[in-house]
């Protein structure tokens, strides 16, 4: 009873604080705030399977779809500003004169200079009833509160098990300068917030990550005016984004290189956009033991080569169809030195490749809602040679990420070379009560948004004759549904269900989660929020802490490192109950 009373008091404080914050913002929205940015991941530089469990967020303005993202954000700002003026009874001129509006940009001659950013700061606590690690056999279990990722299977972005329920910390900040036909951007990004950490994580970033320059020109051709844009530098072009699982069915490319974009607008709302890109991903490793060498020279670096092409056809806001192809390979002899033993020969490096062929379809119909569908084919040969860089696709970074997650690779080339292919399918359907009633988001409160989503990955492996793997394929599928009730402009309530079938041919490799979330914001369209979330998990027999596949590799990459202590908990069920408090904002 005391625990229930404490929970009620805490919830009451949350609601009271949210209401107090919302009163001064009811009907008022910061028109300078963006919607939430797309989220991505950092790269690690090693040829061993990637064990980084931290999902990161790339700057939406640095994507290959810059113009579309910016147009959507500007349209959202216009809607929010209209609501703000309506509720305040102000004319547009009066609204512009309102003091206290946030201004993150300014003009200097011909140049517009500004900044944007994003952060999320989550507190995740896993709750379990376990025997103490120093208890005698037979002692009663006791409540334990642990760092969530140590006892969960769905926090690692580089795993098909990732649900996005338990996102981890990430910060980014970018500065831009633009004038007609010119735009430049420099961005910093990193994770592992030091204020809450008792130690430093040298892999956490906090260094320049984005540096790009775009030059464009309008070409008058009769009744139409195509635009040609050339971008060069370091940034992350992306295609086939699955927003519910924060991954890509077609690919995100971590590159230093170029992209050529041709946009052709036609009459009556039709538009054709062509993308061509070529770049390099820098892979290798940094030697942290620098006792005998300067840190400036304690690296082994080699190049992966990346090429992609994309065609996108649009009709107004109703239809968008894209076709995609990409290829990643290596011809750098430095790559040869990354291996060991006679089997790691440069010929295998030259034979290696990672190909992606796919499509995506976006449909939006008045009252019927929004539908996104994206099938893709991923082919990998000698994935172990392509490292953790270049192509990010299906929760995997580079050829070795795909090899480890889907091709049963574990450093032994006698067992697997990380070769095979995948057939994937992602989908999201979303609709809102306001959409059905033909109203714009924000024009009616309360409002309800519902969605259904899923992702399938069917992989087949090309194993060596010497392999003892008990199977040569893996079928995986995850799906979910959620409903969010916007009670007030500042208060929302969400319920969500997730199911992850890690192996369709083995019913023991499955888990599900039921989650509830209480969200506070100044306005639900303004881009910032603080939420309290509770998740309850149900696990199949084979889903355990630091669990393994029948062939001995980890179910979730890196769990042998992050979940190996105390050793007595290995092979026990992960935490069943998880509480999360998260603050996030995009601006």
Image (spheres, grey):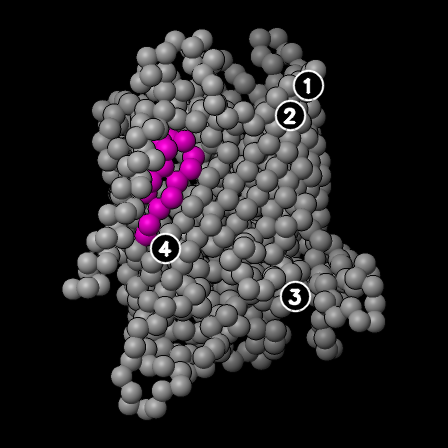
Structural crowding at the residue carrying mark 1, measured as other residues with C-alpha within 10 Å and reported as few (<14), some (14–19) or many (≥20) = few
In the rendered structure, which segment of residues is drawn in magenta? 519-533
Q: In this view of the protein, which residue sits in the foreground, 486 or 389? A: 486
Q: Earlier in the sequence, mark 1 or mark 4?
A: 1
Q: Earlier in the sequence, mark 3 or mark 2?
A: 3
Q: Which residue is mark 3?
A: 47
Q: Are marks 2 and 4 in contact (CB under 8 Å)?
A: no
Q: Nearer the viewer, mark 3 or mark 2?
A: 2
| Cα gap from disc 1 to disc 3, whole angstroms | 47 Å
Q: In this view of the protein, which residue sits in the foreground, 559 or 333? A: 559
Residue 499, position as x, y percentages in the image? 31, 58
Residue 428, position as x, y percentages in the image? 36, 42
- Relative height, residue 63 to residue 515 (above, below): above
Q: Which mark is residue 108?
A: 1
Q: Which residue is mark 4?
A: 580
The quadrant where residue 502 appears: bottom left
Residue 141, position as x, y percentages in the image? 29, 80
């Amino acid at each position: 009873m005391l625990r229930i009373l404490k929970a009620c008091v805490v919830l009451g404080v949350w609601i009271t604080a949210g209401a107090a914050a919302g009163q001064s913002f009811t009907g008022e929205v910061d028109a300078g705030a963006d919607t939430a940015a797309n989220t991505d991941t950092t790269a690690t530089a090693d040829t061993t399977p990637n064990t980084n469990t931290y999902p990161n967020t790339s700057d939406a303005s640095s994507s290959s779809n810059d113009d579309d993202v910016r147009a959507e954000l500007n349209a959202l700002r216009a809607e929010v500003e209209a609501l703000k003026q309506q509720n305040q009874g102000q004319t547009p001129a009066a609204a512009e004169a309102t003091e206290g509006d946030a201004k993150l940009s300014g003009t200097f001659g011909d140049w517009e200079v500004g900044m944007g950013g994003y952060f999320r700061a989550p507190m995740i606590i896993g709750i379990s009833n376990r025997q103490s690690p120093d208890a005698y056999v037979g002692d009663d279990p006791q409540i334990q509160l642990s760092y969530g990722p140590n006892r969960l299977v769905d926090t690692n972005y580089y795993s098909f098990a990732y649900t996005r329920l338990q996102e981890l910390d990430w910060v980014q900040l970018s500065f831009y300068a633009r004038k007609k036909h010119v735009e430049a951007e420099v961005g910093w990004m990193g994770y592992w917030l030091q204020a809450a950490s008792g130690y430093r994580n040298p892999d956490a970033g906090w260094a320049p990550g984005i540096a790009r320059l775009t030059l464009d020109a309008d070409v008058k051709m009769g009744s139409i005016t195509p635009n040609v844009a050339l971008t060069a530098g370091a940034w992350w072009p992306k295609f086939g984004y699955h927003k519910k699982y924060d991954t890509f069915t077609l690919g995100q490319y971590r590159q230093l290189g170029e992209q050529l974009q041709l946009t052709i607008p036609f009459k009556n709302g039709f538009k054709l956009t062509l993308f061509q890109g070529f770049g390099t991903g820098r892979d290798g490793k940094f030697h942290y033991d620098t006792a005998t060498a300067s840190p400036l020279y304690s690296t082994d670096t080699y190049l992966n080569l990346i090429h992609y092409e994309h065609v996108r056809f649009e009709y107004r806001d109703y239809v968008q169809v894209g076709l995609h192809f990409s290829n990643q390979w290596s011809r750098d002899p430095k790559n040869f030195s990354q291996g060991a033993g006679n089997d790691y020969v440069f010929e295998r490096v030259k034979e290696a490749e990672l190909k992606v062929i796919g499509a995506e379809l976006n449909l939006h119909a008045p009252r019927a809602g929004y539908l996104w569908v994206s099938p893709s084919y991923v082919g990998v040969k000698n994935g172990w040679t392509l490292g953790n860089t270049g192509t990010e696709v299906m929760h995997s970074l580079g050829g070795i990420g795909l090899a480890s997650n889907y091709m049963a690779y574990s450093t032994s080339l006698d067992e697997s070379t990380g070769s095979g292919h995948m057939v994937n399918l992602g989908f999201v359907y979303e609709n809102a009560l306001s959409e059905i009633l033909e109203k714009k988001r924000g024009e009616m409160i309360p409002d309800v948004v519902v969605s259904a989503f899923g992702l399938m990955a069917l992989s087949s492996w090309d194993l060596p004759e010497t392999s003892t793997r008990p199977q040569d394929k893996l079928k995986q599928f995850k799906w979910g549904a959620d409903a969010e009730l916007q009670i007030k402009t500042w208060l929302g309530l969400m319920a969500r269900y997730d199911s992850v079938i890690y192996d369709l041919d083995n019913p023991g490799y499955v888990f599900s989660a039921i989650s509830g979330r209480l969200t506070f914001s100044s306005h639900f369209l303004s881009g910032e929020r603080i939420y309290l979330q509770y998740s309850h998990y149900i696990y199949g027999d084979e889903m355990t802490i630091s669990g393994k596949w029948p062939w001995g590799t980890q179910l979730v990459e890196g769990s042998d490192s992050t979940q190996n202590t105390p050793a007595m908990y290995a092979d026990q069920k992960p935490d069943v109950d998880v509480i999360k408090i998260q603050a996030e904002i995009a601006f």
